[in-house]
Image: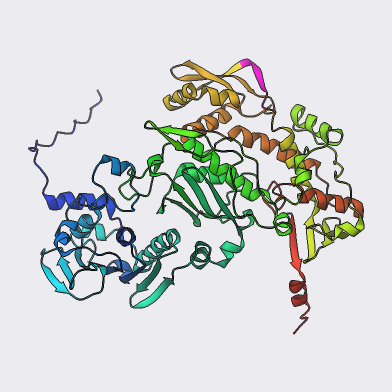
Amino acid sequence: MIDTPPLPQAPPRRPIAELPDELISQIAAGEVVERPASVVRELLDNAIDAGASQVTVRLLEGGIRAITVEDDGQGIPADELPLALRRHATSKIRNLAELEAVGSLGFRGEALAAIASVSDLSITSRTADAAHATRLDARSGELQPAARTRGTTVEVREIFFNPPARRKFLKTEATEQAHCLETLRRVALTRPDIGFALWADGKLAAQWRPSRLDQRLAEVLGEDFVAASRSLSWAAGPLRIEGRLGLPEAARSRADQQYLFVNGRFVRDRTLAHALRSAFDDVLHGQRQPSYALHIDIAPELVDVNVHPTKIEVRFRDSRGLHQQLRRLAEQTLAASRAELEASPPQAHLSAASPPPALTLAGENLPRWNPAPQQSTLPWASRAALAEPRYDPNRDAWLLRASVSTPDAKAPTAPFGAAAAPEAQLEDWPLGRAIAQLHGVYVLAENRHGLVLVDMHAAHERVLYERFKAALAARMDAQPLLIPVVFAASAEEIATCESQQEALQQLGMDLSPLSAQQLALRSRPALLEGADLVSLARRVLADLAAVGGSHALERAQHDLLATLACHAAVRANRQLTLTEMNALLRDMERTERADQCTHGRPTWRQLTLRELDALFLRGR
């Protein structure tokens, strides 16, 4: 007979009682105040909302010993100072309508009360019409006259001295100081018109004076980021997107240079991050992460910022439309090669091709962005060439048939397409005129800047890949399966399948519930023969559930085309004539994303005359 362990006894019943106010504030502080950087963020939000033009942050021992935030804003009247420390007291909102359209950074009315419950806090403030400043000690509640100009100073000392167990979870002083600096960097990127300074243990650690957005980006993120990124600016209706998008060659091993701001607030949003990462799908190698700093201004009625205690997350009314628009803008920004941009005058904006439709919201008609495909307005080198089909049926039809019928078949090397330009005209082209071939691998060309080095296999691979993509853009044919593929599915996958039938049909997938725990796939995209259909269906459903759209099938198709382009591209040690080399250069100038091959490697490099002179010490 097997002995069963005794059941745990229920603890003795305790009567229900209201928690004391101090414990309530400390519990709330656990949601708002995680570390000194959380205090810095909340106080910076208050300073910006007060209309400050200069904000100074002072830290002692990484903010663990003391945090002081000074601003020159409007200040707080003396009779309102005690009220500022009460829970859920704020000047930002008065009713539900104002909450749904909140435009300030701070509005929950709990930050100062939460900070005061876990630290020793004091506030010194003065308004423009006050005879002197007033200091409030949060612990004693005592008001005293003080000396300072207009504005507010908040001193936070000995953070987590009340709940000492929380203090044990803090990191070293250097780590906490680094988090405070990163918080200030994020805020500085949102408001280039405000000056910021950070003093750590009496030493100036960072300072940014009021400037333009592009200058603030260079000061905060570095000149290297600006040099290796492209400007993005677009507006339609209640939506505006502006900032810089890092080039694929500047991708990083970690996602540590990704800044997204919504209405002046730094956020982490999976939908927006997914849109930007998917725009880099065929130009990034492996797990490399793109870099970007983008500001999204949207009508407050279309975004809910009251979904997280620290206001780090937001929720959009039309997340799918915003996802599609942001992805399309990022793809357009990355489409033009460096050679095309250097050869054409810069253009300030990406604009909508047609007036956007109206969005009905709460009985009102608000203008909105257009989620429909748009025509790119990037400065191309040759618009006439792009207006024509990107592939020659007489030349590339056999490659297209190979990709559809036998994806694994090795195709012979395809000839180059564009006819060579006259010798006198070659010097006017961005990639210049071919002059030689090096070891059967590289093409050497000269342009007005100096020497151009081209990896001929990588460049031809990108040219073929973009032709195949254009040829298959309208081909999403569905092929019925002789025997349906049945697989187990979770409740969320089944619910997504039922609600996203239209999207699944557009992707060429006939997927429907077979039972309460099974899905049946009855057709698949014709191109994806031999693919793992169950894994593919799960990825599509996961994308649809997360962002309302899926590019899993598109990525799978592009992977096949990339493999085909790699096999079909010209190989090393093939001797090319000058005419063929010039034809490759012209094809590159007409091809989107020509700077990288399908594996994310660069296809060409520029050596300027100044760099060449430096190699030989000329001019010294």
Q: Quadrant of residue 49?
A: bottom left
430 vs 24, left or right, is: right
Q: Quadrant of residue 428?
A: bottom right
Above or below 314: residue 539: above
Give the position of the N terminus as an image quadrant: top left
Its colouring scheme is: rainbow
Looking at the image, which residue is at 89% across and 47% down?
A: 419
Q: Quadrant of residue 606?
A: bottom right
Residue 37 in view of the camera? no
415 vs 221, left or right, is: right
Chief SS of the magenta region: strand
Above or below 113: residue 71: below
Residue 418 in view of the camera? yes
Above or below 476: residue 584: below
| Residue 25 spot, x, y in % from top left | 18, 52
424 vs 141, left or right, is: right
Depth check: 102 or 466 in front? 102
Q: Which residues are magenta?
A: 475-483
Depth check: 586 or 496 in front? 586
Above or below 138: residue 108: above
